[in-house]
Image (tube, grey):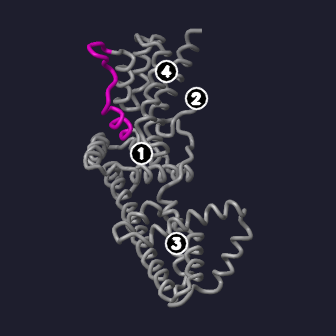
Amino acid sequence: MAASIITPPAISFAVHSISHNHLQFERQFNAWKLSFQFSSTHFSLPYRRRVLVCAVNENAEESFKKTVEVDRLIDMLRDANDKELQKLVAENILAFNESFWIRLAARSETCKSDDDKKDYEDLASLLMSVVDCIVHKTNEKIESATDVLKAILKPVVDEVEEIPWPPRDPEAFKLMEKELNQREQEGQLDEGFLSEVSAQLRQAKEDGDKPGFVAMLQKVLQLYASRTLSKRSYARKGNEVLRDEQFLETIIKAPEEEWNKMLIDGMTIGKGEISPEELENVVKKRIERTLIRTEGGSYQQRVLVEYLKGIQSRSEEIVQLLQGKTQ
C-alpha cells in the first residue's frame, strides 16, 4: 500500500487548490465583465454572432437542456428581491460563465419593449456587481487562510525564513502545536485553510528543493488530523473496553515519529496483544466512519482518511519488516 502524503515516506497526491480554481474563475469573470457592454438598448453585435456559433457547435439536445437551465436561473433572478438575489448568486456562482452572459444578452435582444430591455440591463449590472463582491470576499478569505498558516508556522521558521526540520529549538514545535490548537478552537482551520496547506504542500513537493518546508506542512496536517480524529472515541462499548479501538486511538493521538515503536510494542508480531489483522480491520472501520461523517470530496475528508491510511501503511511496513527478521 502506498504511504500517505502526510506521513513519510510521502507520495504525490493530486488535489486541486481552491485558491487556484477561484483565481481562474476570477480571471474569466473579469474578462467577461470587460467584454460584455450593456448599452441602453441592446448588447453588442459580436455576441449575437457568438450565440449562433455556440448553437451550431454544441449538440442540439444538450444545448437545449443547458438553455432551459440558464433560463430558469435567469427567471429566478429576475423575480428575486435583493436578499434572495444575493443568496441565489452565491449558491450558483459557478453558473455565471460565458454561456450565462450570452444567454442573458440573447434574451435582452428579443425583448419587444425598451422597458423590458432596460430591466435586463439593470439585472446584468446588478449581477456583475454581486458576483464581483463575492469574488473579492473569497480573495479576503484566501488571504486569511494564508495568514493563519503563517501564524502557525512562525515558531518553527527562523528570522531569515530558513526552514530547518526538525526545529533547532525543541520548544518551537510545542509553540507551533499550541498555535494550531488555538486556531482550531477559534474555528479557523476550515476548508479554506486545509486547501491552502494542501496547495502549498503540493507546490513544495513539485519544487523539490524545500524538504524542510514539506516536512513542516505535513506536520501541520498530521496535527490537524490527530486532533480532529481524537475528538470522538469508539474504545468503549458499554462497560467493555475494546482493545483494538483503544490501541488505534493511542496511535492516532501520538506523534508520527513514535508510531514505529508503538506498533512494535502493541502488535502480536512484536511485543503486544493486538494482531495485525485486528488493527487493519479497526483502521478500515474508522476510515468508513470518517467517510460517513465528513463531506464527500472535502479537504477535511482527504486529510483525515490519508492520516488513517498512513497508520495502516506503517503497520504493514512493520509487519513485513518483522516477518523478514523471523524467517
Q: Which of disc 1 and disc 4 is earlier in sequence?
A: 1
- Which label belongs to residue 280? 4
Q: Which of marks 2 and 4 is in front?
A: 4
Task: Tell whether 276 sits left or right of 46.
Answer: left
Determine whether 261 is above or below 217 in the image.
above
What residue range appears in magenta? 223-241
Q: Which of disc 3 and disc 4 is earlier in sequence?
A: 3
Q: What element carries label 3?
A: helix
- The residue nearer to you, when weighing 108 against 265, is 108
> Which residue is at 52% across, 35% downward?
9
> Which residue is at 39% across, 52% downward?
193
Q: Which of disc 2 and disc 3 is earlier in sequence?
A: 2
- Which label belongs to residue 29? 3
> Which residue is at 59% across, 75% downward?
102
Cα distance, mark 4 to mark 3? 48 Å
Cα distance, mark 4 to mark 1? 28 Å
- The residue nearer to you, when weighing 71 against 285, is 71
Q: Where is residue 174 in the image (x, y as percent from the top left)?
A: 28, 41
Q: What residue type is labelled 3?
A: Phe
Whether the magenta-drawn stretch holds residue 237 is answered as yes
- Which label belongs to residue 216? 1
Determine whether 176 is above or below 141 in the image.
above
